[in-house]
């Protein structure tokens, strides 16, 4: 088996704690239409499948809400302005990325967050360690389709046998499976260890330093 030298990360709930900013933008959009706000713990369960699904889950009636598209647009515009108000890397992330880069690992991020935000956040928080960042766009199918993973692999010049995927959700487990690469799940993000086990996780790290135990 080829040596693993490429780590492809999910973003929200894996590298970045984005929950407060996501919740604030969701509730900003909801309040504009007289809709009830959600606490962070509720929004935690809504994220992972892209912003349209997030708002579909947040809005009573989902896409049947007459002003769904306008509400979604208000969320996106607010989030673009406020995506770094409270967002920060999880403990140990920067140290891990630095060490991995120094050891020669190629590092990428693939996310169901819209592409502009993914590229901006990775540049602001993870440069120079993460060199490839790909988010949701009309040109590529979002996770759990493997397309963003394949795009990252192509950009990095990596083969599947060299890659490992790291994420915090059932979407990430399915994405890695669809891409034909192993997945290391993390329990500090938006889904619990119990949830991950129920959805087929075989390797779970409770702290980012534990990722080394699963990397040959």
Image (tube, rainbow, N blue to C red):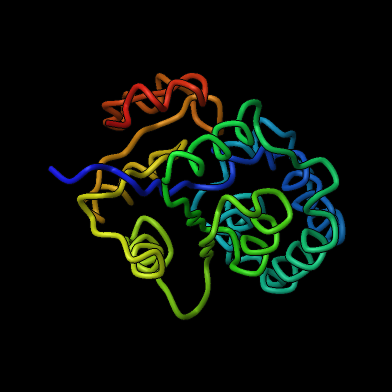
Q: Quadrant of the N terminus?
A: top left
33 displayed left or right of 1: right
Residue 194 coordinates in the image, percent (x, y): 40, 19
Please report the residue visible at 28 percent of the width from the left and 43 percent of the height from the top.
4
Residue 19 coordinates in the image, percent (x, y): 69, 39
Please report the residue visible at 55 percent of the width from the left and 32 percent of the height from the top.
96
Residue 59 coordinates in the image, percent (x, y): 67, 54
71 displayed left or right of 31: left
Q: Residue furthest left?
A: 1
**Considering depth in this image, is 28 or 206 the residue closer to the camera?**
206
- Picture layout, residue 210 above or below residue 149: above
Residue 55 coordinates in the image, percent (x, y): 64, 57
- Picture layout, residue 117 above or below residue 202: below
Q: Quadrant of the C terminus?
A: top left
**Considering depth in this image, is 11 or 102 the residue closer to the camera?**
102
Looking at the rendered structure, the number of numbered marks drawn on it comes to 0
Please report the residue visible at 42 percent of the width from the left and 74 percent of the height from the top.
140
132 displayed left or right of 181: right
Q: Residue 202, located in which quarter of the rendered image?
A: top left
**Considering depth in this image, is 129 or 109 the residue closer to the camera?**
129
Please report the residue visible at 32 percent of the width from the left and 27 percent of the height from the top.
214
């Amino acid at each position: 088996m080829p040596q693993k030298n490429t780590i492809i990360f999910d973003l929200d709930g894996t590298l970045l704690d984005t929950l407060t900013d996501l919740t604030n933008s969701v509730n900003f959009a909801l309040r504009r239409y007289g809709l009830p706000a959600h606490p962070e713990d509720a929004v935690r369960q809504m994220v992972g499948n892209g912003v349209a699904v997030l708002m579909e889950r947040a809005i009573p009636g989902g896409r049947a809400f007459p002003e769904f598209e306008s509400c979604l647009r208000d969320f996106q515009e607010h989030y673009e302005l406020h995506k770094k108000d409270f967002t920060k890397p999880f403990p140990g992330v920067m140290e891990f990325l630095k060490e991995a880069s120094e050891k020669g690992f190629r590092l990428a991020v693939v996310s169901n967050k819209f592409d502009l935000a993914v590229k901006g956040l990775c540049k602001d928080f993870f440069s120079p360690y993460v060199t490839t960042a790909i988010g949701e766009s009309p040109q590529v199918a979002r996770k759990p389709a493997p397309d963003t993973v394949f795009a990252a692999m192509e950009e990095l010049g990596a083969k599947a046998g060299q890659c490992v995927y790291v994420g915090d959700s059932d979407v990430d487990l399915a994405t890695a499976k669809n891409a034909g690469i192993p997945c290391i799940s993390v329990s500090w993000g938006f889904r619990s260890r119990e949830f991950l086990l129920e959805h087929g996780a075989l390797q779970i790290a409770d702290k980012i330093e534990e990722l080394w135990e699963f990397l040959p």
